[in-house]
Every structure is written in C-alpha cells, then in structure tokens.
Amino acid sequence: MFMLFFAPHTCALATHIAFLDAGLEAGADYTLRRVDFAHLEQRSPEYLAVNPKGRVPALATPRGILTETPAMLAFVAQSFPDAGLAPLADPFAFAELQAFNSFICSSLHVAHAHRMRGHRWVDENDHDAILAMQKKVPESVGACYDLIETGMLKGPWVMGEAYSIADPYLFTLAQWLEQDGVDPARIPRVMDHRARMAERPNVMTAIAEEFA
C-alpha cells in the first residue's frame, strides 16, 4: 500500500495519474492524503515529519518516504513494470525519459514558480526583485516550452508512439502555461498533447478525485 500526499493545482497530479495508469494495468494499490495549503498544513509539525521540505507531493511506501516527482514517477514505473509506463529494458531510452522529466522539474517548474514564489530566491521584502522575476516568467517559461515543442516532444506522446510517465508530468505543468503568459499558438504540438491527455479517463478521474 502506498499513500500519496497531494494538494490540488500542484505537480502531485502527475504521480496521481501514473498510479491510476499503473492500477489499471497492474493492480497498483494506493490511497490519497490531501494536504490543506489554505491552512498551511504543509508547514505543520505532522507534515514536516513526513516531508521536511514542506511541499507536495510526498509518497509513503513500505520502505520509507519518497519526494520529488521524477523519482516518484520512476518508482511507479519500476514498481509496476507490467503497466508499460517506461522503457525499462532500454537503458538509453529510460535515461532519455529521465532527462525529460528532470528538465520539467529543474527548469520549467522552477521558471513557473518564479511567478508566485519569488520569496524562495530573494528576500520577500525585496519587491523590485520579486516583480522582476514575475515579469521574466512569460519569457523563461515560454523558452522551456519552445524547447519541448521543437526538440523534446518526439511524437504524439513525449517519448514517441508509446505513452509513458513523462506524459502526465508534461500535462500537469502545461495546464498552467496561459497563467504564465505563454501564447498557446506558439506551441501547437504541446497544446495537442495537453488536449489528448485531458481526454484520457485516468486523467479525468485523477482531477475529479483531487477536487472531491
């Protein structure tokens, strides 16, 4: 049994979708635990004992806690290989998938976070610095999507013809691109991917469960 700690409108959705995908194919058993950001539960002693980073997602497993979405997605894919969520038998292809998810985590998500969470990088009272970071977001996030559009999205799915754990991760971040000031018209392949992901039953179920 696994427990996924999540909050709506966060990257926890990617792992939630992956568990549903694994459950459909391989019988993955998990429960959800919502962390109430409105009441700052992520900073409570109880949650910090789970994840000292004070963020979601976190995944409780029989062997301990996992954090960071790329690691959690890889864990789901490797724990339920029959679901076919990653090219586990091909070291190079699996590394390519990991490289994509690492880019989402270290570049795209960080650029996105500059819009709302500038206090992570500069003093929260430095309003000019925070404003400068916010003004840069359409450019920095847009540049990430340009790379994905022209050189990283291999086919109808991130890795080409086969759906993988990279797809729910891209979908999760792509839901926020308009708010980040990115013109959807400049990235038609990303937008097509987002639309097809939104039609998948497991994606619709995950979103409904997070807002239940």
Image (cartoon, grey):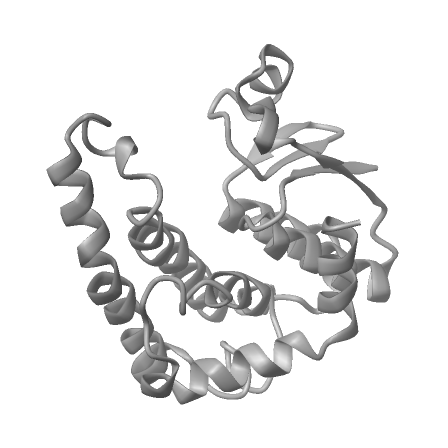
The residue at 60%/25% (across/down) is: 39
**Nearest the camera: 119 or 71?**
119
Residue 3 at x, y percent in the picture: 75, 36
Q: Quadrant of the N terminus?
A: top right
Total numbered circles: 0
Residue found at the very far top of the displayed protein: 45
Where 18 sits versus 117, above or below?
below
Where 65 sits versus 164, above or below?
above
**Nearest the camera: 133 or 143?**
133
**Nearest the camera: 86 or 128?**
128
Q: Is residue 161 left or right of residue 204?
A: left
Residue 79 at x, y percent in the picture: 72, 50
Residue 26 placement: quadrant: bottom right
Where 190 sits versus 98, above or below?
below
Where 107 sits versus 65, above or below?
below
The residue at 16%/35% (across/down) is: 127
The residue at 59%/34% (across/down) is: 66
Residue 8 at x, y percent in the picture: 63, 47
**Nearest the camera: 65 or 168?**
168
Q: Is residue 45 left or right of residue 128?
A: right
The residue at 53%/66% (across/down) is: 166
Residue 6 placement: quadrant: top right
Residue 77 at x, y percent in the picture: 66, 57
Q: Is residue 87 left or right of residue 180?
A: right
